[in-house]
Image: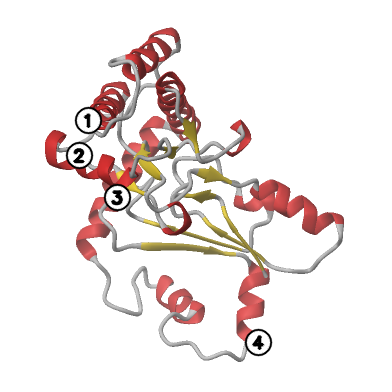
Amino acid sequence: AVFCTQNETATGVTSDVAGCRAVLDAVNHPALLFVDGVSSIGSIDFRQEEWRVDCAVSGSQKGFMLPAGLGFLSVSKKALAASRVATHRRCYFSFDDMIRANDAGYFPYTPATQLLRGLRASLDLIAEEGLDNIFARHHRLAEGVRKAVDAWGLKLCAKAPQWHSDTVSAILVPEGIDSGDVVKRAYRTYQTSLGGGLNKVFGKVFRIGHLGWLNEVMVCASLSAAEMALLDCGVRLAPGSGVAAAIEHFRRTAAMPVAEAA
């Protein structure tokens, strides 16, 4: 199987799932295509049938706007057939167990019923706004963050625009600055949670998430806290520059209507 992460949260990089499918088709390769859509599905365009993705996985804590605790799987007939002849041991999850329970509208194991009720409300919000509007809103808000980063004189971890994520931005800090200090400062002084760098980019990037139920004002508030934390940690930038760039972008572009939370 070929595994692809559509949106990599540690680096803020979006992958080309359609391109992966095109490569498999070009060489007539029979491999299954599996996609990690945890931080993309519901926020970034994903087309399982069109791209012939055999297994897609997501979680409740990102685009579905819920606490962590629910996992979502969508599996093709090809992948189901492969699972039935696979010989590896299954410790917990079985497609067949889930399919049998689905006929009765229930689960083979104890479900998180409170999250399922929350999911109903989340899906109502998604249906009210419409996926195309959701994707456009996320792109517009992400562009505002990118305008701010450029005004700060900083760079994104994702080098080229085609890789820029519309749900999270990983921002490189200058040499001599520890991004962990920026994250701590934002939280302790300005009560704002930013993401830190992971693995190879530990101490080199901080992350701003911009997905789910949010609007321009929420994004600008996060940018303001990030900007103050950067200044406090010794990053040389013009105070107000990032927030001003984001505001200018938002004022020049059409706002997407956001569904009203219940």
Whether tag 3 and tag 2 are in contact, CB under 8 A, the answer is no
Q: Is the N terminus in the top left, top right, bottom left or bottom right quadrant? A: bottom right
Write down the quadrant of residue 21 in the picture.
bottom right
Q: Residues within 10 Å of mark 4 (few under 14, many from 20)?
A: few
Name the residue that disc number 2 marks. 185
Whether tag 4 and tag 2 are in contact, CB under 8 A, the answer is no
Label 3 residue SS: helix
Outermost residue on the front side: it is: 176
Pair 4/1: label in front: 1
Pair 1/2: label in front: 1
Q: Is the C terminus in the top left, top right, bottom left or bottom right quadrant? A: top left
Whether tag 1 and tag 3 are in contact, CB under 8 A, the answer is no
Given residues 242 and 40, the one toward you in this image is: 242
Residue drawn at x 42%, y 71% is 102
Which sits earlier in the primary sequence, circle 1 or circle 2?
A: 2
Name the residue that disc number 1 marks. 232
Image-based side of 120 in relation to 156, left or right: left
Which sits earlier in the primary sequence, circle 3 or circle 4?
A: 4
Residue 102 higher or lower than 177, as above or below = below
Which sits earlier in the primary sequence, circle 1 or circle 3?
A: 3
In space, the residues marked 4 and 1 are separated at their CA atoms by 59 Å
Residue 54 higher or lower than 84, as above or below = above
Whether tag 1 and tag 2 are in contact, CB under 8 A, the answer is yes
Name the residue that disc number 3 marks. 120
Given residues 127 and 135, the one toward you in this image is: 135
Residue 17 higher or lower than 84, as above or below = above
Q: What's under tag 2, amino acid-wise?
A: Arg
Whether tag 4 and tag 1 are in contact, CB under 8 A, the answer is no
In space, the residues marked 1 and 3 are separated at their CA atoms by 42 Å
